[in-house]
Amino acid sequence: MSGGYDLRCEPWIPVRLLTGESTRVGLRELFERAHEIGDVEVPLPPAAAGLMRVLAPIAARIAADGGKQLDDPKTAAIIDDWLDLRERVLKAGRFDPTAVDAYFGRPDLEGRFDLLHPQRPFLQDPRLLAECVDAKGAPNPSGINKLVMGRPTGINGAVLFGHFTDTAPVPVPAAEAAWHLIAQLYYGPAGQCTPRRITTERTGSGDAAPLRKSVSYFAWGPELFTTLVLAVPVPQDVGDWEEVDDACPWEEDLPDPLGPLAPLTWPGRMLTGRFRHAALLVPSPDGRSVTDAYLTWSTHQPPHQARDPYQVLERRFDGQFQPREADAARALWRDLDALLLKDSRHDHLRPPALEHLPRPLRWPVRAYGFDQDGQQKDSVWFKATTPPVLQWQEESDAHMAHHIHHCHTTAEDVGKRLDYAARIAWKIATDPAVDLSPKAKITLDRRKPGPWASAASSRYWPAAETTFWQLTRPGTGSDRAGRAFVDVALTALDEAIGPSNRADIRVARARHKARNLILALLRPAPAAD
């Protein structure tokens, strides 16, 4: 074993065992004990989402039955054969320890899992030490704060999550540095970066990472073994992939930054081969922490157009599909119909990783998201887990899937009406010139929404979630959804406006108008002529 920080055996991944005990494991132990592990507890959701994409192709290399591995392209070419193989792997209940040892003991991978290896560090490019230099040829690192998500960068960076500045950098334990490395490769920013000189040109800009501003959904099994097997993406249009060897970055030579991209093969390059950033960590003398880092571009070639297997696609205004963007204000239950319904009927496409799941489907969904813009701004990351909702996929329980869709659609419609009604109410209460006659049209100024809409929305959505889960109980009819969500909206509106005994006549009229706008949702639509 090489010196440094070997991720195969160093305890860098926090996990919770089925016994309830929390511990840390290396990659080898994680796969050997996957059937004893209940959850991965990496505290950084962007790192956890990236880690799942690193673990999935390794699981595909290790999981096998009858001499066939889950990443076998010949088996993958016939989807029914691949699904049968996965079913047999799941029935085994654990990864074969011999297969685990065989993969992590491969001679060609020696040193490749070492986070701080001097020649071939894990998921890093050692050439940056010579290529990221200033005009005088001196090393030009990006700074440790550039690596660690949540820390301010630059001399005037805002101090939000701790008193970290570039003038007094604080080293990061090697385990945490591994988390942030993975997070940067999958969610890193676009635009200006540390310049990298390969030819006579010194370029200092790059593209956004492949998962930037996205949310990922995974079927979450009762133990990690099932979760990882289900995370191996179902083969999609394998085509001529059999003709090209699949590889992950630690399994092949360093790519030419100026050359064409390697073919996008399944599952390794699909999940781990689309990075737009290159990184290099600078270790402390004892190799237990990271004191500095280089972060720059890895390629300027146009990215492969690939369907990520863990993302929902939704239809844009122009009819094209794009990944659903992460929104910290949007609770996971509002995405359930996109995870349960078949693609053909609605304006979204279900994540391929949630297709062709084996029965029974009494599993939850785990979501990891990072609310960001497309360039540099990071807002909030989040993790959420549903109850065991996959049992309600349309293929298994069409009635329940459509009931959930109806409840969600009703909640969204009521939420939109509440926002509109609260804005109308504020306009009536604060503008004496508003015509309150029954047929008068009230024009809203988008620049002046007033405080009631935001206050009502912040009260509505948490209460609507409670109501939603109540409506999913057995025997609850869809006909109750409209009345239930309207009641929630009326309560939220009243709480946002405040007690009626403190309101003047215009506020009372505003409240009455807004309530009628919401109650109108319960009235039957007028019959067509």
Image: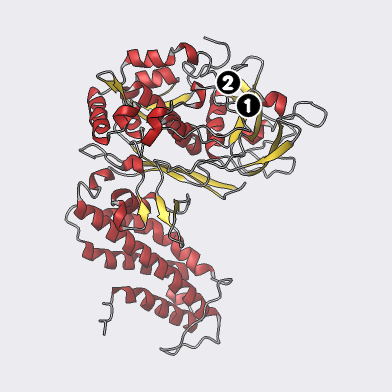
Q: In the rendering, at what x and y percent does residue 163 appear? A: 67, 37
Kindly state the secondary structure of the residue where label 1 is placed: strand
Query: Residue placed at 33% from the left, 68% from the top?
Result: 486
Q: Position of residue 197 (x, y in %)?
A: 72, 31
Which mark, residue 12? none
Determine if residue 57 is in view: yes
Question: From the viewer's perspective, is 441 left or right of 198?
Answer: left
Position of residue 299 measured from the top left corner of the image (x, y, whole percent): 61, 36
Residue type (three-letter) at the residue carrying disc 1? Leu
Kind of residue at disc 2 = Pro
Distance of label 1 from label 2 (alpha carbons): 8 Å
Which quadrant of the figure has residue 118? top right
Query: Looking at the image, which residue sits at the far left?
Result: 475
Q: Quadrant of residue 31?
A: top left
- x, y percent for residue 307: 42, 43
Along the line of sight, the residue nearer the viewer: 314 or 503: 314
Q: Which mark is residue 121?
A: 2
Depicted 239 relative to depicted 417: above or below: above
Q: Residue at x 20, y 46 (%)?
A: 396
Residue 280's mark? 1
Q: Is residue 515 above or below residue 291?
A: below
Asked whether the beta carbons under mark 1 and mark 2 sit within 8 Å of each other, the answer is yes
Kindly state the secondary structure of the residue where label 2 is placed: loop
Count of numbered circles on the image: 2
Structural crowding at the residue carrying mark 2, measured as other residues with C-alpha within 10 Å and reported as few (<14), some (14–19) or many (≥20)? many
